[in-house]
Protein backbone atom coordinates (compact mmCIF):
# COMPACT_ATOMS: atom_id res chain seq x y z
CA UNK A 1 0.00 0.00 0.00
CA UNK A 2 0.88 3.66 -0.37
CA UNK A 3 0.49 5.14 3.13
CA UNK A 4 0.74 8.81 4.06
CA UNK A 5 1.30 9.80 7.70
CA UNK A 6 0.04 13.34 8.38
CA UNK A 7 1.57 14.37 11.71
CA UNK A 8 2.64 17.30 13.86
CA UNK A 9 5.70 15.54 15.31
CA UNK A 10 7.91 12.52 14.67
CA UNK A 11 11.23 11.40 16.11
CA UNK A 12 14.03 12.19 15.68
CA UNK A 13 12.93 15.57 14.32
CA UNK A 14 10.35 16.89 16.80
CA UNK A 15 8.87 15.41 19.95
CA UNK A 16 6.72 16.39 22.92
CA UNK A 17 5.48 12.92 23.88
CA UNK A 18 4.66 9.38 22.84
CA UNK A 19 2.93 10.48 19.62
CA UNK A 20 6.27 11.22 17.96
CA UNK A 21 7.69 7.82 18.93
CA UNK A 22 4.58 5.94 17.84
CA UNK A 23 4.37 7.56 14.39
CA UNK A 24 8.00 6.90 13.51
CA UNK A 25 8.04 3.34 14.86
CA UNK A 26 4.78 2.43 13.13
CA UNK A 27 6.02 3.93 9.86
CA UNK A 28 9.22 1.86 10.02
CA UNK A 29 7.28 -1.32 10.82
CA UNK A 30 4.89 -0.71 7.90
CA UNK A 31 7.80 -0.08 5.54
CA UNK A 32 9.42 -3.35 6.62
CA UNK A 33 6.18 -5.08 5.58
CA UNK A 34 6.73 -3.74 2.07
CA UNK A 35 4.44 -0.69 2.13
CA UNK A 36 5.43 2.62 0.57
CA UNK A 37 5.27 5.07 3.48
CA UNK A 38 5.71 8.84 3.42
CA UNK A 39 5.43 11.33 6.29
CA UNK A 40 4.39 14.98 6.05
CA UNK A 41 5.03 17.29 9.01
CA UNK A 42 6.02 20.90 9.74
CA UNK A 43 9.61 22.13 9.67
CA UNK A 44 10.03 23.69 13.07
CA UNK A 45 12.84 26.12 13.90
CA UNK A 46 15.06 23.43 15.42
CA UNK A 47 14.98 21.28 12.26
CA UNK A 48 18.03 22.42 10.30
CA UNK A 49 17.25 23.26 6.66
CA UNK A 50 20.90 22.63 5.77
CA UNK A 51 20.40 18.93 6.46
CA UNK A 52 17.33 18.69 4.21
CA UNK A 53 16.84 18.65 0.46
CA UNK A 54 14.62 21.48 -0.86
CA UNK A 55 11.96 20.76 -3.47
CA UNK A 56 12.04 23.12 -6.42
CA UNK A 57 9.90 26.23 -6.20
CA UNK A 58 7.37 27.34 -3.62
CA UNK A 59 3.96 25.83 -2.89
CA UNK A 60 0.66 27.68 -2.62
CA UNK A 61 -2.03 26.29 -0.30
CA UNK A 62 -5.55 27.61 -0.73
CA UNK A 63 -7.10 28.49 2.61
CA UNK A 64 -10.22 30.49 3.45
CA UNK A 65 -10.09 33.49 1.15
CA UNK A 66 -6.31 33.54 0.82
CA UNK A 67 -3.40 31.50 -0.46
CA UNK A 68 -0.56 30.58 1.91
CA UNK A 69 2.89 30.14 0.38
CA UNK A 70 5.59 27.88 1.75
CA UNK A 71 8.61 25.78 0.83
CA UNK A 72 8.87 22.00 1.04
CA UNK A 73 11.95 20.04 2.08
CA UNK A 74 12.55 16.34 2.32
CA UNK A 75 14.86 13.75 3.83
CA UNK A 76 14.95 10.02 4.59
CA UNK A 77 13.79 8.61 7.91
CA UNK A 78 16.79 7.23 9.85
CA UNK A 79 16.62 3.46 10.14
CA UNK A 80 14.49 3.05 7.01
CA UNK A 81 14.81 -0.20 5.05
CA UNK A 82 17.51 0.39 2.43
CA UNK A 83 15.35 -1.08 -0.31
CA UNK A 84 12.24 0.83 0.79
CA UNK A 85 13.21 4.17 2.39
CA UNK A 86 10.61 6.37 4.10
CA UNK A 87 10.58 9.92 2.74
CA UNK A 88 9.70 12.72 5.15
CA UNK A 89 8.42 15.98 3.68
CA UNK A 90 8.68 19.14 5.78
CA UNK A 91 6.31 22.05 5.22
CA UNK A 92 8.37 25.20 5.75
CA UNK A 93 6.01 28.06 6.65
CA UNK A 94 8.13 30.43 8.70
CA UNK A 95 5.26 32.40 10.25
CA UNK A 96 3.42 29.29 11.45
CA UNK A 97 6.23 26.88 12.27
CA UNK A 98 9.46 28.87 12.63
CA UNK A 99 9.25 28.66 16.40
CA UNK A 100 11.07 26.86 19.17
CA UNK A 101 7.94 25.13 20.46
CA UNK A 102 5.52 22.80 18.70
CA UNK A 103 2.24 23.69 20.41
CA UNK A 104 3.27 26.19 23.09
CA UNK A 105 5.94 28.64 24.19
CA UNK A 106 8.57 28.26 26.91
CA UNK A 107 5.95 29.22 29.52
CA UNK A 108 3.76 26.28 28.40
CA UNK A 109 1.15 28.67 26.97
CA UNK A 110 -0.56 27.47 23.79
CA UNK A 111 0.17 29.55 20.71
CA UNK A 112 -2.88 31.70 20.05
CA UNK A 113 -2.82 30.86 16.32
CA UNK A 114 -2.75 27.06 16.81
CA UNK A 115 -6.11 26.57 15.05
CA UNK A 116 -4.74 28.29 11.93
CA UNK A 117 -1.35 26.59 12.13
CA UNK A 118 -2.77 23.09 12.17
CA UNK A 119 -5.71 23.76 9.88
CA UNK A 120 -3.08 24.88 7.37
CA UNK A 121 -1.04 21.71 8.01
CA UNK A 122 -4.08 19.48 7.44
CA UNK A 123 -4.88 21.17 4.14
CA UNK A 124 -1.26 21.40 2.99
CA UNK A 125 -0.69 17.63 3.03
CA UNK A 126 -2.86 17.36 -0.09
CA UNK A 127 -0.95 20.11 -1.86
CA UNK A 128 2.34 18.33 -1.09
CA UNK A 129 0.94 15.18 -2.72
CA UNK A 130 0.04 17.22 -5.80
CA UNK A 131 3.51 18.75 -5.86
CA UNK A 132 5.34 15.41 -5.77
CA UNK A 133 2.78 13.59 -7.92
CA UNK A 134 2.18 10.87 -5.34
CA UNK A 135 -1.28 9.91 -4.07
CA UNK A 136 -1.85 7.54 -1.13
CA UNK A 137 -4.17 4.61 -0.72
CA UNK A 138 -4.34 5.49 2.97
CA UNK A 139 -4.22 8.94 4.58
CA UNK A 140 -3.38 8.34 8.25
CA UNK A 141 -3.90 11.38 10.50
CA UNK A 142 -2.84 11.53 14.14
CA UNK A 143 -4.59 13.43 16.93
CA UNK A 144 -6.22 16.85 16.67
CA UNK A 145 -3.36 18.70 14.87
CA UNK A 146 -4.03 16.77 11.64
CA UNK A 147 -7.61 15.68 12.33
CA UNK A 148 -8.92 18.06 9.65
CA UNK A 149 -7.14 16.12 6.91
CA UNK A 150 -9.94 13.48 6.88
CA UNK A 151 -12.43 16.38 6.87
CA UNK A 152 -10.87 17.95 3.77
CA UNK A 153 -10.79 14.54 2.11
CA UNK A 154 -14.48 13.95 2.80
CA UNK A 155 -15.70 17.42 1.85
CA UNK A 156 -14.32 18.25 -1.56
CA UNK A 157 -10.99 16.48 -2.12
CA UNK A 158 -12.19 12.90 -2.56
CA UNK A 159 -12.18 13.24 -6.29
CA UNK A 160 -9.58 13.03 -9.05
CA UNK A 161 -6.28 11.65 -7.73
CA UNK A 162 -7.67 11.21 -4.17
CA UNK A 163 -10.81 9.37 -5.29
CA UNK A 164 -9.65 6.03 -3.86
CA UNK A 165 -7.88 7.37 -0.75
CA UNK A 166 -9.32 6.26 2.60
CA UNK A 167 -8.73 8.18 5.83
CA UNK A 168 -7.69 6.85 9.21
CA UNK A 169 -7.62 8.93 12.40
CA UNK A 170 -5.66 7.66 15.39
CA UNK A 171 -6.54 9.19 18.76
CA UNK A 172 -3.42 9.08 20.92
CA UNK A 173 -4.94 11.06 23.80
CA UNK A 174 -8.58 12.13 23.88
CA UNK A 175 -7.78 14.76 26.49
CA UNK A 176 -6.38 17.04 23.77
CA UNK A 177 -8.99 17.99 21.18
CA UNK A 178 -8.08 21.33 19.60
CA UNK A 179 -11.05 23.38 20.85
CA UNK A 180 -11.00 27.01 19.69
CA UNK A 181 -13.32 29.92 18.95
CA UNK A 182 -15.58 29.25 15.97
CA UNK A 183 -14.32 32.42 14.25
CA UNK A 184 -11.34 30.30 13.23
CA UNK A 185 -13.61 28.13 11.06
CA UNK A 186 -13.57 30.72 8.26
CA UNK A 187 -9.89 29.95 7.68
CA UNK A 188 -10.71 26.31 6.78
CA UNK A 189 -12.40 27.49 3.58
CA UNK A 190 -15.20 24.98 4.19
CA UNK A 191 -18.90 25.78 3.88
CA UNK A 192 -20.50 26.92 7.14
CA UNK A 193 -23.06 24.11 6.85
CA UNK A 194 -20.19 21.70 7.51
CA UNK A 195 -19.51 23.46 10.82
CA UNK A 196 -22.76 21.96 12.13
CA UNK A 197 -23.23 18.88 9.94
CA UNK A 198 -19.57 17.86 10.03
CA UNK A 199 -19.18 17.76 13.79
CA UNK A 200 -17.16 20.94 14.37
CA UNK A 201 -19.71 22.58 16.66
CA UNK A 202 -18.98 22.09 20.37
CA UNK A 203 -20.95 24.33 22.73
CA UNK A 204 -20.47 27.24 20.34
CA UNK A 205 -16.78 26.48 19.87
CA UNK A 206 -14.86 24.73 17.08
CA UNK A 207 -13.65 21.22 18.00
CA UNK A 208 -11.09 19.96 15.48
CA UNK A 209 -10.78 16.40 16.83
CA UNK A 210 -14.55 15.97 16.94
CA UNK A 211 -14.80 16.93 13.26
CA UNK A 212 -12.11 14.37 12.43
CA UNK A 213 -14.02 11.68 14.33
CA UNK A 214 -17.11 12.37 12.22
CA UNK A 215 -15.19 12.49 8.94
CA UNK A 216 -12.59 9.68 9.05
CA UNK A 217 -13.38 6.39 7.36
CA UNK A 218 -11.82 4.42 10.21
CA UNK A 219 -10.89 5.40 13.77
CA UNK A 220 -8.65 3.84 16.36
CA UNK A 221 -6.94 4.55 19.62
CA UNK A 222 -3.81 3.08 21.12
CA UNK A 223 -5.10 0.25 23.31
CA UNK A 224 -8.17 -1.95 23.46
CA UNK A 225 -9.13 -0.99 27.00
CA UNK A 226 -8.76 2.74 26.33
CA UNK A 227 -11.00 2.29 23.26
CA UNK A 228 -13.79 1.03 25.51
CA UNK A 229 -13.09 3.65 28.20
CA UNK A 230 -13.39 6.53 25.72
CA UNK A 231 -16.96 5.46 24.97
CA UNK A 232 -17.94 6.21 28.57
CA UNK A 233 -18.67 9.53 30.26
CA UNK A 234 -15.84 8.97 32.75
CA UNK A 235 -13.07 8.91 30.13
CA UNK A 236 -14.81 10.28 27.03
CA UNK A 237 -14.01 13.99 27.57
CA UNK A 238 -17.48 14.80 26.17
CA UNK A 239 -16.74 12.87 22.95
CA UNK A 240 -18.07 9.54 24.21
CA UNK A 241 -21.28 10.11 22.24
CA UNK A 242 -19.60 10.56 18.84
CA UNK A 243 -17.30 7.61 19.57
CA UNK A 244 -20.24 5.38 20.45
CA UNK A 245 -21.91 6.59 17.25
CA UNK A 246 -18.81 5.54 15.28
CA UNK A 247 -18.20 2.36 17.30
CA UNK A 248 -18.53 0.08 14.26
CA UNK A 249 -15.52 1.84 12.71
CA UNK A 250 -13.60 2.36 15.96
CA UNK A 251 -11.09 -0.05 17.51
CA UNK A 252 -8.10 -0.21 19.81
CA UNK A 253 -4.63 -1.21 18.60
CA UNK A 254 -1.93 -1.34 21.26
CA UNK A 255 1.20 0.67 20.55
CA UNK A 256 4.47 -1.20 20.39
CA UNK A 257 7.90 -0.13 21.57
CA UNK A 258 11.06 0.38 19.57
CA UNK A 259 12.97 -2.77 20.49
CA UNK A 260 16.10 -1.47 18.77
CA UNK A 261 16.25 1.31 21.39
CA UNK A 262 14.63 -0.36 24.39
CA UNK A 263 16.38 -3.70 24.77
CA UNK A 264 18.46 -4.48 27.87
CA UNK A 265 20.62 -6.97 25.99
CA UNK A 266 21.80 -4.27 23.56
CA UNK A 267 21.36 -1.03 25.52
CA UNK A 268 24.46 1.17 25.27
CA UNK A 269 23.08 3.71 27.75
CA UNK A 270 23.37 1.41 30.76
CA UNK A 271 26.60 0.22 32.46
CA UNK A 272 26.35 -3.37 31.21
CA UNK A 273 23.77 -5.05 28.96
CA UNK A 274 21.87 -7.94 30.50
CA UNK A 275 19.31 -10.59 29.64
CA UNK A 276 16.90 -13.01 31.26
CA UNK A 277 19.73 -15.56 31.53
CA UNK A 278 22.30 -13.13 32.97
CA UNK A 279 20.92 -10.40 35.23
CA UNK A 280 24.28 -9.14 36.50
CA UNK A 281 23.96 -6.01 34.38
CA UNK A 282 20.78 -5.05 36.22
CA UNK A 283 22.65 -5.17 39.54
CA UNK A 284 25.29 -2.84 38.11
CA UNK A 285 22.60 -0.51 36.77
CA UNK A 286 21.00 -0.28 40.22
CA UNK A 287 24.34 0.63 41.78
CA UNK A 288 24.96 3.27 39.08
CA UNK A 289 21.46 4.69 39.59
CA UNK A 290 21.94 4.97 43.34
CA UNK A 291 25.27 6.75 42.84
CA UNK A 292 23.83 9.07 40.18
CA UNK A 293 21.13 10.31 42.57
CA UNK A 294 23.36 10.35 45.63
CA UNK A 295 21.55 7.54 47.41
CA UNK A 296 23.18 4.96 49.66
CA UNK A 297 24.43 2.02 47.60
CA UNK A 298 22.24 -0.71 49.08
CA UNK A 299 21.70 -3.60 46.66
CA UNK A 300 19.07 -5.27 48.87
CA UNK A 301 16.91 -2.17 49.36
CA UNK A 302 14.06 -2.00 46.82
CA UNK A 303 14.34 0.98 44.49
CA UNK A 304 11.23 2.57 42.93
CA UNK A 305 11.66 4.63 39.77
CA UNK A 306 9.48 7.09 37.86
CA UNK A 307 9.96 8.80 34.50
CA UNK A 308 6.93 10.97 33.90
CA UNK A 309 5.34 14.21 32.84
CA UNK A 310 4.25 16.03 35.98
CA UNK A 311 0.64 16.51 34.91
CA UNK A 312 -2.77 15.70 36.38
CA UNK A 313 -3.17 12.76 33.98
CA UNK A 314 -0.24 11.01 35.65
CA UNK A 315 -1.79 11.01 39.15
CA UNK A 316 0.70 13.51 40.57
CA UNK A 317 -1.86 15.09 42.91
CA UNK A 318 -2.56 11.85 44.74
CA UNK A 319 1.15 11.05 44.90
CA UNK A 320 2.80 14.42 45.54
CA UNK A 321 0.01 16.80 46.56
CA UNK A 322 1.15 18.94 49.54
CA UNK A 323 -0.27 17.64 52.83
CA UNK A 324 -2.25 14.82 51.22
CA UNK A 325 -0.10 13.02 48.61
CA UNK A 326 1.24 9.62 49.63
CA UNK A 327 4.88 9.94 48.49
CA UNK A 328 6.13 11.40 51.79
CA UNK A 329 4.44 8.66 53.84
CA UNK A 330 5.73 5.96 51.51
CA UNK A 331 9.32 7.11 51.92
CA UNK A 332 8.93 7.73 55.66
CA UNK A 333 7.25 4.44 56.54
CA UNK A 334 8.86 1.92 54.18
CA UNK A 335 12.43 0.74 53.77
CA UNK A 336 12.92 1.68 50.13
CA UNK A 337 14.49 4.23 47.83
CA UNK A 338 12.57 6.40 45.35
CA UNK A 339 13.88 8.33 42.31
CA UNK A 340 11.99 10.40 39.74
CA UNK A 341 12.77 12.54 36.71
CA UNK A 342 10.24 14.70 34.94
CA UNK A 343 8.98 18.16 34.14
CA UNK A 344 5.55 19.73 34.18
CA UNK A 345 3.35 21.65 36.58
CA UNK A 346 5.32 24.17 38.61
CA UNK A 347 3.78 23.27 41.96
CA UNK A 348 4.77 19.63 41.50
CA UNK A 349 8.31 20.47 40.43
CA UNK A 350 8.68 22.51 43.63
CA UNK A 351 7.11 19.82 45.80
CA UNK A 352 9.33 16.97 44.63
CA UNK A 353 12.39 19.22 44.89
CA UNK A 354 11.39 19.89 48.50
CA UNK A 355 10.84 16.19 49.20
CA UNK A 356 14.27 15.48 47.78
CA UNK A 357 15.77 17.89 50.31
CA UNK A 358 13.77 16.55 53.28
CA UNK A 359 13.90 12.79 52.70
CA UNK A 360 17.16 10.81 52.67
CA UNK A 361 15.68 8.07 50.45
CA UNK A 362 13.92 10.27 47.85
CA UNK A 363 15.62 12.02 44.94
CA UNK A 364 14.17 14.06 42.08
CA UNK A 365 15.55 15.64 38.94
CA UNK A 366 13.52 18.30 37.12
CA UNK A 367 14.55 17.39 33.59
CA UNK A 368 14.18 14.79 30.91
CA UNK A 369 17.21 12.83 29.82
CA UNK A 370 17.16 9.79 27.55
CA UNK A 371 20.26 8.43 29.28
CA UNK A 372 18.80 8.84 32.77
CA UNK A 373 15.49 7.38 31.61
CA UNK A 374 17.25 4.22 30.45
CA UNK A 375 19.23 4.02 33.70
CA UNK A 376 16.03 4.31 35.78
CA UNK A 377 14.29 1.59 33.77
CA UNK A 378 17.28 -0.74 34.12
CA UNK A 379 18.34 0.09 37.69
CA UNK A 380 14.95 0.20 39.42
CA UNK A 381 13.29 -2.82 41.00
CA UNK A 382 9.81 -1.30 40.69
CA UNK A 383 8.31 1.38 38.43
CA UNK A 384 5.37 3.51 39.62
CA UNK A 385 2.64 4.75 37.22
CA UNK A 386 -0.45 5.93 39.18
CA UNK A 387 -2.15 7.31 36.05
CA UNK A 388 -5.58 8.90 36.13
CA UNK A 389 -5.97 7.63 32.59
CA UNK A 390 -3.42 6.12 30.22
CA UNK A 391 -4.28 5.66 26.52
CA UNK A 392 -1.44 3.20 26.03
CA UNK A 393 1.59 3.95 28.15
CA UNK A 394 5.11 3.04 27.16
CA UNK A 395 7.08 3.08 30.39
CA UNK A 396 5.29 0.08 31.83
CA UNK A 397 6.33 -1.87 28.72
CA UNK A 398 9.91 -0.61 28.94
CA UNK A 399 9.91 -1.64 32.60
CA UNK A 400 8.71 -5.16 31.91
CA UNK A 401 11.32 -5.70 29.22
CA UNK A 402 14.02 -4.47 31.64
CA UNK A 403 12.88 -6.76 34.48
CA UNK A 404 11.45 -3.85 36.49
CA UNK A 405 8.00 -4.65 37.89
CA UNK A 406 5.33 -1.97 37.29
CA UNK A 407 3.01 -0.63 39.99
CA UNK A 408 0.08 0.71 37.97
CA UNK A 409 -3.58 1.59 38.08
CA UNK A 410 -6.28 -0.46 36.33
CA UNK A 411 -6.79 1.85 33.37
CA UNK A 412 -6.24 2.04 29.60
CA UNK A 413 -3.19 0.38 28.11
CA UNK A 414 -1.88 -0.50 31.57
CA UNK A 415 -4.63 -3.13 31.80
CA UNK A 416 -3.65 -4.53 28.40
CA UNK A 417 0.06 -4.88 29.21
CA UNK A 418 0.38 -5.67 32.95
CA UNK A 419 -0.97 -8.78 34.70
CA UNK A 420 -1.75 -8.31 38.38
CA UNK A 421 0.35 -10.31 40.84
CA UNK A 422 -1.23 -13.38 42.45
CA UNK A 423 0.33 -13.71 45.87
CA UNK A 424 -0.62 -17.39 46.15
CA UNK A 425 0.72 -18.66 42.83
CA UNK A 426 3.34 -16.08 41.85
CA UNK A 427 1.53 -15.39 38.58
CA UNK A 428 1.53 -11.88 37.15
CA UNK A 429 3.95 -9.22 35.99
CA UNK A 430 3.16 -6.28 38.27
CA UNK A 431 1.05 -4.75 41.03
CA UNK A 432 -2.25 -3.04 40.25
CA UNK A 433 -4.87 -0.92 42.05
CA UNK A 434 -8.25 0.53 41.07
CA UNK A 435 -9.08 3.67 43.04
CA UNK A 436 -6.88 6.68 42.40
CA UNK A 437 -6.42 7.79 45.99
CA UNK A 438 -3.31 8.47 48.10
CA UNK A 439 -4.25 5.53 50.31
CA UNK A 440 -4.58 3.13 47.36
CA UNK A 441 -1.15 4.14 46.05
CA UNK A 442 0.35 3.79 49.53
CA UNK A 443 -1.19 0.35 50.06
CA UNK A 444 -0.15 -0.99 46.65
CA UNK A 445 3.41 0.23 47.00
CA UNK A 446 3.41 -1.38 50.44
CA UNK A 447 2.19 -4.64 48.90
CA UNK A 448 4.98 -4.57 46.33
CA UNK A 449 7.61 -3.82 48.99
CA UNK A 450 6.26 -6.63 51.22
CA UNK A 451 6.51 -9.00 48.26
CA UNK A 452 10.06 -7.85 47.52
CA UNK A 453 11.20 -8.73 51.03
CA UNK A 454 9.02 -11.78 51.71
CA UNK A 455 8.54 -13.42 48.30
CA UNK A 456 11.85 -12.87 46.48
CA UNK A 457 11.29 -16.02 44.43
CA UNK A 458 8.04 -14.53 43.07
CA UNK A 459 9.81 -11.27 42.24
CA UNK A 460 12.46 -13.18 40.26
CA UNK A 461 9.85 -15.23 38.39
CA UNK A 462 7.82 -12.11 37.48
CA UNK A 463 10.95 -10.30 36.30
CA UNK A 464 11.80 -13.10 33.90
CA UNK A 465 8.20 -13.41 32.77
CA UNK A 466 8.09 -9.72 31.89
CA UNK A 467 11.42 -9.81 30.07
CA UNK A 468 10.15 -12.49 27.67
CA UNK A 469 7.04 -10.54 26.57
CA UNK A 470 6.87 -9.26 22.98
CA UNK A 471 5.91 -5.58 22.69
CA UNK A 472 7.48 -5.01 19.28
CA UNK A 473 5.66 -3.06 16.58
CA UNK A 474 5.40 -6.09 14.29
CA UNK A 475 2.03 -7.28 15.63
CA UNK A 476 0.63 -3.74 15.89
CA UNK A 477 1.65 -2.95 12.29
CA UNK A 478 -0.22 -6.02 11.03
CA UNK A 479 -3.35 -4.90 12.88
CA UNK A 480 -3.06 -1.46 11.26
CA UNK A 481 -2.79 -3.21 7.90
CA UNK A 482 -6.05 -5.04 8.65
CA UNK A 483 -7.74 -1.72 9.45
CA UNK A 484 -6.40 -0.13 6.27
CA UNK A 485 -7.69 -3.04 4.16
CA UNK A 486 -11.06 -2.85 5.90
CA UNK A 487 -11.35 0.83 5.04
CA UNK A 488 -10.34 0.27 1.42
CA UNK A 489 -12.75 -2.63 0.91
CA UNK A 490 -15.64 -0.59 2.33
CA UNK A 491 -14.90 2.48 0.21
Image: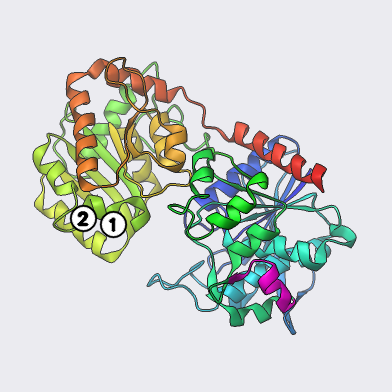
Contact, mark 1 vs mark 2 (Cβ under 8 Å):
yes
Label annotation for residue 401: none
Q: Is mark 2 on a helix, strand or loop?
A: helix
Between 161 and 353, the one lying in front of the other is 161
Label annotation for residue 366: 1
Between 442 and 85, the one lying in front of the other is 442
Q: Could you tell me which residue is drawn at 43 percent across and 36 percent down?
A: 415
Residue behind mark 2: 352
Q: How far apart are marks 1 and 2 (CA)?
A: 9 Å
Above-or-below relation of 185 to 479: below
Where on the picture, by quarter, is residue 211?
Answer: bottom right
Above-or-below relation of 340 to 16: above
Label 1 neighbourhood size at 10 Å, few (<14), some (14-19), many (20+)? Answer: some
- Magenta span includes 34: no
Between 250 and 45, the one lying in front of the other is 250
Q: Look at the image and give the residue range highlighted in magenta.
A: 191-201
Expressed as whole percent of the image width and height from the top left, the position of residue 6 reads: 67, 57
Above-or-below relation of 204 to 15: below
In the picture provided, is 363 more to the left or to the right than 401?
A: left
In the picture provided, is 240 more to the left or to the right than 435?
A: right
Amino acid sequence: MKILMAVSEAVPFAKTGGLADAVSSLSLALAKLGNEVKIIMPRYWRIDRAKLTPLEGEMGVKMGGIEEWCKVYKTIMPGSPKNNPIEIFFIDHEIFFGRDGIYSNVFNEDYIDNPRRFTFLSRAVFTVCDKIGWYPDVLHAHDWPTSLAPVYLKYGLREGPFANTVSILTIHNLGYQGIYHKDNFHYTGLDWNIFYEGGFEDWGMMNMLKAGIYAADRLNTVSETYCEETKTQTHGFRLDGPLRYRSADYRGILNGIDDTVWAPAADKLIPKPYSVTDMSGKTLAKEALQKYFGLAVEPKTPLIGMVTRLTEQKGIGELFGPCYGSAFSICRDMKLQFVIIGTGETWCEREITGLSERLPNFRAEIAYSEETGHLIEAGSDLFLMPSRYEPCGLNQMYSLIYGTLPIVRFTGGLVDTVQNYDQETGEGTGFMFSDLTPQAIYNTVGWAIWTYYNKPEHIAIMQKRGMTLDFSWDLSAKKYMEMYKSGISAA
